[in-house]
Image: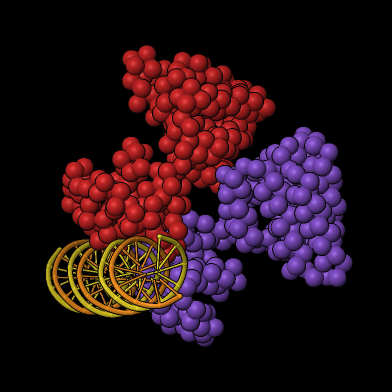
Chain colours: A purple, B red, C yellow, D orange
Amino acid sequence: MQSNELPKELAARRIDRPVPLREHVYQAMQELIISRRLAPGQHLVESELAQMLGVSRQPVREALQWLNNEGWVDLRPGYGAFVHAPTQDEADQLLAVRSLLESESARLAAVHADAEGIARLRDLNRQGIEALASDDVDTAVALNAAVHRCVTELSGNKVLLDFATQVDRRVRWYYTPIARQRGEQSWQEHAKLIDAIENRDADAAARIMKEHTERTRKSYLEQRVEDGEDDQQLIALPTRRRRKAAKA
Amino acid sequence: MQSNELPKELAARRIDRPVPLREHVYQAMQELIISRRLAPGQHLVESELAQMLGVSRQPVREALQWLNNEGWVDLRPGYGAFVHAPTQDEADQLLAVRSLLESESARLAAVHADAEGIARLRDLNRQGIEALASDDVDTAVALNAAVHRCVTELSGNKVLLDFATQVDRRVRWYYTPIARQRGEQSWQEHAKLIDAIENRDADAAARIMKEHTERTRKSYLEQRVEDGEDDQQLIALPTRRRRKAAKA
DNA sequence: AAGCTGTATGCTGTAGACAGCACGCAGAGA
DNA sequence: TCTCTGCGTGCTGTCTACAGCATACAGCTT
């Protein structure tokens, strides 16, 4: 924790009460992790977090549990929480699972989607293309996620939706750079997918989604290799050492 | 909560300290839920649970969060925890996801499994058949789960393993009766699956696992229909009403 | 008699405090 | 110089206490 420069605006959230504090803590920490202000492998000391966010340790603990379930932090009983350090292997495996879940979603969506849902898909896709055209990358990324989520919703399998959502959140950790790279093509693939769903061609929908997500996966791997990101695991330092390191 | 007749032996767990109390609470409550001593839809009052298990509210809260993530209880912020009331739809969807994850596991296992892993599979399967022969249903159920888990481990995809494990835990809520019904056949299918993995025939392995799990799924649905279990949702009563109902 | 409002109570969410373990360091012995 | 043992410290796990909201009921109004 690099002291108290950043969290002021987060602590301010405290004022609105109806939403439990742990929610704010959860969101704040997720942001901090995604933005890498909390480094992978870093030991998260509850009392420091609590002070930093202006709450007591309890909401922090509860938020940490949530973050743990969603793969953001690792909880080692008796030792505390550590920011999850994703490896390239894990990213690949995650994207593989995503591919699996989403292609099945597409298959089911082709069976169960209603006209209203298909219209929603088309609309999202149209907006995505527009966002891309105007170089609004963030919106495009969000809309891309929305399209995928919508397909999964249309599958009619809530359990599948739950799991896909989990995967998606974790994927997004790695995702933004990919999305930047695979611009236009991605949205054309979406269009074909929607066609397949509308035509009730389950196999085609599944196949298109499979290819689509596998391309994303490859794209990610290639990029990482280009970056030469060598996936060094920041080993979590035991507390004392960490303090020493901070001094130096 | 039907008062304090049952939890004495659970409270006794408290004596061994090294494992956090929340773990014990978690396990105890999972047992209580699976065994239906806590009814689906029932409101779980933290203070009552705490007293019942001989701990304070905090470990109970943490255990409840954990149970929530795994689908055993539903957490309504500000209103407390309620035992999850599974519907037939949900069971079906859960088994569908299981089928999907496990068939992919089988496919990957056929690619990545090593000789040692295959030997382990054969061994587990042999033990399972023996257990079945001697009518040891509980052991057979456990071994069945072990076989499936082992296949997933051999897939080499840790993320997949994580998700499959989650699904498996939730499936087990419904599972025991199914296993009883589908005895021998199940283990023969396992044998074929293992053969396919050994022969590195990924497609066959995936197909066999798909059929295997889909049969389980159908078996479950048919049984439920036979039972005439009409899936009535026990609506969670607000607190006061519950107390009144208890009196009456 | 029906609807509304004030009040009592039960429950959650949060805070603050304590106990115990594990780590790390210092000093003694070889 | 190296190993072992004892002590200090930091952190987690847990407990107790409190604040605030939501429900349910009683009494009031119309």
Return the x and y of residue B109 as percentages of the image width and height.
Answer: 58, 33
Q: Can residue A147 be seen from the camera position used here?
A: yes
Side of A4 relative to A146 (left or right):
left
Camera-nearest residue between B160 and B46: B46
Return the x and y of residue C8 as percentages of the image width and height.
Answer: 25, 71
Side of B53 relative to B30 (left or right):
left
Camera-nearest residue between D10 and A187: A187
Q: Is residue B200 above or below residue A94?
A: above
Q: Which quadrant holds residue B34?
A: top left
Camera-nearest residue between A91 and B246: B246
Residue beneath the point at 54% across and 39% down: B90
Q: Residue furthest top?
A: B133
Residue beneath the point at 68% across and 43% down: A155
Q: Is residue A242 above or below residue B190?
A: below
Return the x and y of residue A17 as percentages of the image width and height.
Answer: 46, 76
Residue beneath the point at 48% across and 82% down: A15
Return the x and y of residue A181 as percentages of the image width and height.
Answer: 79, 61
Q: Can residue A74 be seen from the camera position used here?
A: no
Residue beneath the point at 82% across and 67% down: A131
Q: Which quadrant holds residue B208?
A: top right
